[in-house]
Amino acid sequence: MAQRAVWLISHEPGTPLCGTVRFSRRYPTVEKRAKVFNGASYVPIPEDDPFLKALLFELRLLDDDKDFMESRDSCSCINKTSIYGLPGGGGELWPVVAFQKNDMIYACVPLVEQTLSPRPPLISISGISQGFELLFGIQDFLYSGQKNDTELNTKLSQLPDLLLQACPFGTLLDANLQNSLDSINFISVQKHPQKQPAWKAGTYKGKPQVSISITEKVKSMQYDKQDVADTWQVDGAVTCKCDLEGIMPNVTISLSLPTNGSPLQDILVHPCVTSLDSAILTSSSIDAVDDSAFSGPYKFPFTPPLESFNLCYYTSQVPVPPILGFYQVKEEEVQLKITVNLKLHESVKNNFEFCEAHIPFYNRGPVTHVEYKVSFGQLEVFREKSLLIWIIGQKFPKSMEISLAGTVTFGAKSHKKQPFDQICIGGTAYLKLHFKILDYTLTGCYADQHSVQVFASGKPKISTNRKLISSDYYIWNSKAPAPVTYGSLLL
Amino acid sequence: MGRLSREAWAQRLGAFRASPSAFMAGPEGEDLGRDLLSDLRSEKLSEQTKVSLLVLSLEYPAQLWPDAPAAEAAASSLLDTLVLLPPRPSALRQPLLLAATTALAAGGALGPTSAASRRLLPLLLGLASGRDLGRGFGPASEQRPLQATACECLRELESCKPGLLGGCLGLLRGLLGQEGPVGPVQPLSLLLALALRNTLVTQARAGAGLQGLLVAGVSPAGASPWNWTLAEDGDAHLQPQAPSWLAAEEGECGLAALEPSPEEARELRAAVAQLLDTSYLLTPVAQAQLLWLLGWALRGLRGQLPVLFKTQLVRLLGTAQLTLLHAVLALKAAFGEALFTAQDEDLLLRRLTLAAQHPALPPPTHLFYLHCLLSFPENCPLGATGEEAAPLLLRPQLCRGLLPSLLHDPMALLARLHLLCLLCAEDEEKDEKGQGQSPQRYLGELLAGLRQRAALDGGPRALATLCFQASYLVAHCLAGQPTVMTSLTHGLVRLYRDRPVLAPHFVDLLDRVGPELGEPLRVALRQEVVSRPGKDEALRWHLQMLAKVADRGAQSGTLRFLQAAAAHCTDWGLQQALLQVCRALLRAGVRGGLADLLQALARQLEDPDGRDHARLYYILLAHLAAPKLGVALGPSLVAPALASSLVAENQGFAAALMVQEAPAPIRLSVGPRRAEGPGPVLQLQVEVLEPVYSLELRFRVEGQLYAPLGAVHVPCLCPGRPAHPLLLPLQPRRPAPTQLDVRALYTTPAGLTCHAHLPPLPVNFADLFLPFPQPPEGAGLSFFEELWDSCLPEGTESRLWCPLGPQGLEALVSRHLEPFVVAAQPPTSYHIAIRLPPDSRLLLRLEAAQGDGVPVALRTDDWAVLPLAGDYFRGLSAAA
């Protein structure tokens, strides 16, 4: 379950190497075990530069993909997980766990405690999930609250010290690196009479308070077609911050639904939750929803960590999408004729923080001319980006229905400037809705202040908040083919 | 090297990290390990800098201390540094413990005879058990973190020497169970779990029982806590302990041999329960480690032990943590039905299915869960193990959300496509009515979408690659379904029609798929190509494609296409491509029309190489029977016929392209010395026995005494013709003699390239002598005296007796030391100053010669030179 080495690589397209190793750490005692375990199939960990080159090639992040290269482009080189084999001195280095996020590539090589030929199935290697967790932990540490490059560099410079705490010998002790940072700074003088959890660096001193915030994201794919069903789904996250005294305070939070609320499904909880009702464990989007579905209250007893954490995630299938619309595009010589219609469902709170429809045009030249009529809001045109943004504002009008009609003319296509898209070929096009509603959830889910039970000294102040935001809310051109999921074909 | 400043260390560490191997090969490499250890005690460096030095030693002990004695010495030094720390808070104690542990474990020095091991282990155990080790071990505030670190160090040592802590099990249990003020739970739990696992495995292997090792708080009477006998079988115990994931059967891991007595079983159960009960106090990743270890430890043991895990399962199944769910799968694999009923298995599968698509989890996690689904350890597996397959309980209804769509990124698409293929394969077995939205139809539409994207002119290659990977995957999984293969074939041919530039992908696909897709696709592509007029922009791709798919079928069409194409093959590349097709036809046994075509090509092609080629093929076709032709053209297909393949088919050409190992026809010797110029230069005399062309002499110096030497090139050498001496500048890093390893690479008159190893060349001490700049007339003596005085106090002085031959002192000096004389009163007194690169000097006073010898007073600023100078004078007298 140990790691042989870890790397952080920044992807820098356009530079000679296309990347730089920002951080690396090797674990020689683990390496020594790898040599024994892997036997003849052992391949040593390469130095940083050759590793960088091999990994970027494998991830297709080098700039040259003009020519067919068998080792990369062959149809039989199929990768279905983020785990790679990298050719190098004396064989193939495997398994390399690697993924890219925010221009940073995270990579590590877990120890496999057996021979590598034949390759054992990934599921049997405990170091794989440990490696992922280490990389996710580093990613969270680097990017939580980080705003600019200076902060990123500061955090990168703290990594050697942090890994000395969190992963001194290649076996991960805590994926929460912030916790390790706190425990460096936190010096406990007295021994604790009670057993202290390893995931809690110290204890809180001060006014007791609990804050709970529920964020729901709604996504949708709307086609306005006979043979393809529209789809939409809500996923929610409940974030808590519990400032409570004592080593192991107990808290129970209940999430409730109004009578017509949509049941929560696919609930995943934080490891600090101590027990779960079996109805919570089994309510799943895989099964068809019926009236007998468990609809709460959803009780989560837990002992909170010091930091803010995600108590649980859920999904839900609400009966209707909050905004239903259609989008039609007709090609007329060099012009596109577009029609958009959007309707807010009456049950949805008509009070947005913002609401916009982004209408991009891919694989075409720049927009040279637009003629349009909107029933509501205003339209902004970004010519070079070939993008229209319809700013709808804070409220839909009384009719709850708005429309846009117009013609867009394009100039000559120049390959570099205009956006390329592999989906929007031919007439395939979409518009994407961006909106946010405060103090509202689509499922109706809420955390009642009175239902929060806290077993700790002092009566805590409890604050709650809710919001709904859109994510991946697409309305496809109904006059052309659109990418569908299997679910939308099951009419 | 003296003490380095913070900046100097930062620079040095940076240079080392950029490329450890290059740094270690450089001049500073040798001293790094020593400097690091000594500077850890320097008072000038900040703690932060010292921590960074220790971090380096944690990562690269093998480079710093390459063998076991060096590692042992380093560990001792690190422990000394630790003991010498003043009793105030320090950030160094923890990394010093880690570094000493790493040095011993990674350096192979850990063992009962190692003094450092005998110091480190009791220290770690003392710290881990929270014993008061005296004020030297830092303030009370550091006890707790040090206790945790000591546990981690012990865990690492136990990992490297399984069984080492077998005698500590009772002690560890006691510590973990302590009431009142307690130590850190996580490090103790993990240490106990690992030691328990290793002890169970090693005892089972030795056929021994638990022997009361587990009784809490008790060490077996008189026993040392270190079990070197268990750990000392070399690395034997590091042999894979879980060789096969799915082998939950008893006896597989030898644990069945361990039949605990009822008492031992009770102790074992209590220990496991104790660990599990406090597991919620561990971080999620540590909980997962604990479960893996215990799962491993108890697998195959008889009794009711798996049930102990049951209470943890509901809590674990609810989380989104990758490590925890993975650990549950490990328990599932280890215990099967003993822990998971059919309903539990169903629930686990459902949780896994929803985790594989849950929007709150990151994409790499989805992919890993998808892999876990297809490798799910079922209670009652059907079919072969090792192959990915959909588990029986995973009904299509469950998979709806896991099917691919064009919106997925390539990896997710391929992973989900695999699942879809598995469903299609099952679907066919069940019903063929195909009503409604069958998976096959969906698969067809998806593939069509992928092809549409691949056909996009100017699109990135990754899109094309993805399309072919998907086609390959489908062909691999659904080869037995003719309808799928037919539509796939049609779709691919259409793709080729739209974008012939993808020909290399098609060739690759045809190389890798089985005949179910390969055969129909080959025929369809051939028809597609030959139905075109032979003058296409994409002719190059058509020819490449045809070279792959051409055979005896549709000969006349193929030949017609080639005839038409020949007129447009204006450049060498196209002609070669055309000839490649002819070659493929030759191999396939096409005769009739091909002879005419080849004859026409032999006249018509512009390039002479192409014409020759066509003629050769024609001759082969006319004179060889089909089987022989196949053999003749067969083997060299491996070598791509890019260069003139006329010659490539000739054995001699292969020899001509290879470097031959040969005895050297070259003799190399060191000529007279040239004591001039800024650095020492070796004058080489070279003689040859036969003519040699393009000679390259490469020199290598053993060790790091000299900077790498450049090669010397000579265009041509003939026997009997005197050659100019070759000058080889040397760059010594120490003024010391050495030997040069010499290799020669040259071309013979026959055109073969040869490589030879020549006898080594000696570089003598005297070859390094260089004169000082000549002082002005008359100032010689004072110049010498100044140099003489400057040698002390850093340098050294010595006297020796140099015997003289019959010719006396004057002859000796003029023969050997003439260029270095600074002041002299011949024939009795000579003052000689010699510069020794890189920056040493050797000063000699030869005065008051007697009949048979002369006393030599010498001074140098470099101690190391002294023995060399002594040898030199002894050599002179021997020669005299």
Image: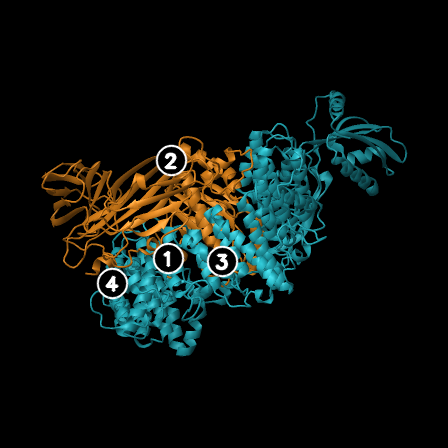
Chain colours: A orange, B cyan
Q: Name the subunit of mark 1.
A: B
CA gap, disc 3 and disc 2: 41 Å
Q: Is residue B750 left or right of residue B359?
A: right
Instruction: Work out whether mark 3 precedes mark 4 in sequence or the reverse, and give the earlier one.
Output: 3
Residue B308 image label = 3
Mark in front: 1 vs 2: 1
Which residue is disc 4 drawn over?
B442
Residue B599 seen anywhere in this rendered image of the structure: no
- Residue at 56% over, 56% down: B270
Instruction: Work out whether mark 1 precedes mark 3 in sequence or the reverse, and give the earlier one.
Output: 3
- Residue at 59% over, 39% down: B146
Mark in front: 2 vs 4: 2
For disc 1, the neighbor class at 10 Å (few under 14, some 14 to 19, many from 20) is many
The amino acid pointed to by label 2 is: Gly
Mark in front: 1 vs 3: 3
Q: Is residue A383 left or right of residue A199?
A: left
Mark in front: 3 vs 4: 3
Q: Is residue A283 left or right of residue A180?
A: left
For disc 3, the neighbor class at 10 Å (few under 14, some 14 to 19, many from 20) is some
Q: Quadrant of the N terminus of chain B?
A: top right
CA gap, disc 3 and disc 4: 46 Å
CA gap, disc 2 and disc 4: 43 Å
The amino acid pointed to by label 3 is: Leu
Residue B352 image label = 1
CA gap, disc 1 and disc 2: 31 Å
The amino acid pointed to by label 1 is: Leu
